[in-house]
Amino acid sequence: MVPLAIVRQYAVGQQIAYEVADQEIVLHYALRLLNEAGLVGRSEPGAAPGALLFKGGTALRKCVFGSAGRFSQDVDLDATHENGFEAEIERAFAERTPFHGIAFSIPQFRYSQEGNFSGTIEYEHEHSGGRFELQISYRLDPILDSRDLALQEQSYFRRVEFEPPLLHGLDPYEMVGEKIMACNRRLGGSAKDVYDLYLWAGRPFDEALVRLLAVLKAWTDRRAGRPYRPNEFLDQIEQRRFRWEDIGGLVPRRLESDPERICATVRARFSFLAVCSEEERAILDDQAAHRERRLFDRLRMEARQAAGDVPR
């Protein structure tokens, strides 16, 4: 495990609490463990990637936003096929603990109505301990082709006992499409998703591709609840609709912390979501009935082609 002094230095440099810095580093070890088990990423350059795709807030923090991102307290994965991966994960942690001085255990398992898996991972090492959530979504049909995800350099890397793992997961554009869907579902819930959209808003990106992905994700997101209507979604990005305490301590103190400004920025930067083509509107009108499979497949191919051309 990274020496205590290095964890403390990292906490000071990132302007976060020691516990948050410690967990950020523990997640790095957990990803390496899953990588060595052949579940996540590539064992070496050119090797076939594992069957679980890295995604979500931790993936955005570690592979896209880097030190500008909010810290995340879970690991989100997508399964490329349904095969009881939760048992493989439990075995991987059990066989490799302690992993470079970190003892891992999984005391709790849960399944959603959709069959998705969530496990609480507890960890303990010489200087601290804690827990994080590991979730597997058994939604087996991503819009875009998966991609290799390079970890953004962090100061603690030079003191870790191994090279950074070679990760593989959802295309960051698809992760943002999922963030839009999560934010739409959770109006009145956590501010984590809207804050991630705010961070994405500060980057150059292809607006047409993000809009198309949001539309296509709405069509594939077969969950009961609020349908995705871009105008209504944007109108409801307001400070009062989110729990801002959920990101307390997860955002470095030097970064933006004004909820009203964050919401205003997201509404303005993502206003293009409401400017849909006729085909995109047809998909949105069909997000409950799912009769437009042929149109969906054609637009997905267009999205994949566009994703191959956008600058990274």
Image (spheres, rainbow, N blue to C red):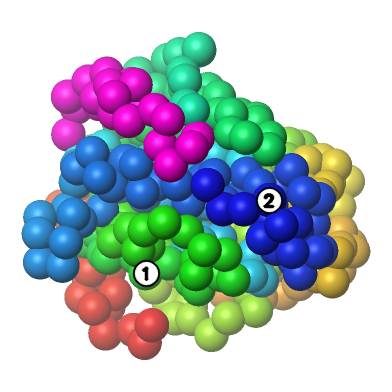
Say left or right for 243 vs 305.
right
- In x, y percent, where is residue 253? 86, 64
Q: Which residue is labeled 2 in the image? A: 4
Label 1 is placed on what type of residue?
A: Ala
- 88 inside magenta stretch: yes
Q: Residue at x 38, y 82 (%)?
A: 312
Nearest to the observer: residue 100 or residue 228: 100
Q: Is residue 212 visible?
A: no
Question: How many dots with numbers?
Answer: 2
- In x, y percent, where is residue 109? 45, 13
Q: Which mark is residue 65?
A: none
Q: Residue at x 34, y 42 (%)?
A: 33
Residue at the left extreme, as displayed? 47
Give the mark nearer the N terminus: 1 vs 2. Answer: 2
- In x, y percent, where is residue 285? 42, 47
The residues tagged by marks 1 and 2 sit, at their Cα atoms, a distance apart of 26 Å
Q: Is residue 196 above or below residue 185?
A: below
Say left or right for 171 vs 21.
left
- 205 inside magenta stretch: no
What segment is highlighted magenta in the picture?
81-102
Q: Secondary structure at mark 2?
A: helix
Nearest to the observer: residue 101 or residue 34: 101
Q: Which mark is residue 150?
A: 1
Q: Secondary structure at mark 1?
A: loop
- In x, y percent, where is residue 265? 76, 72
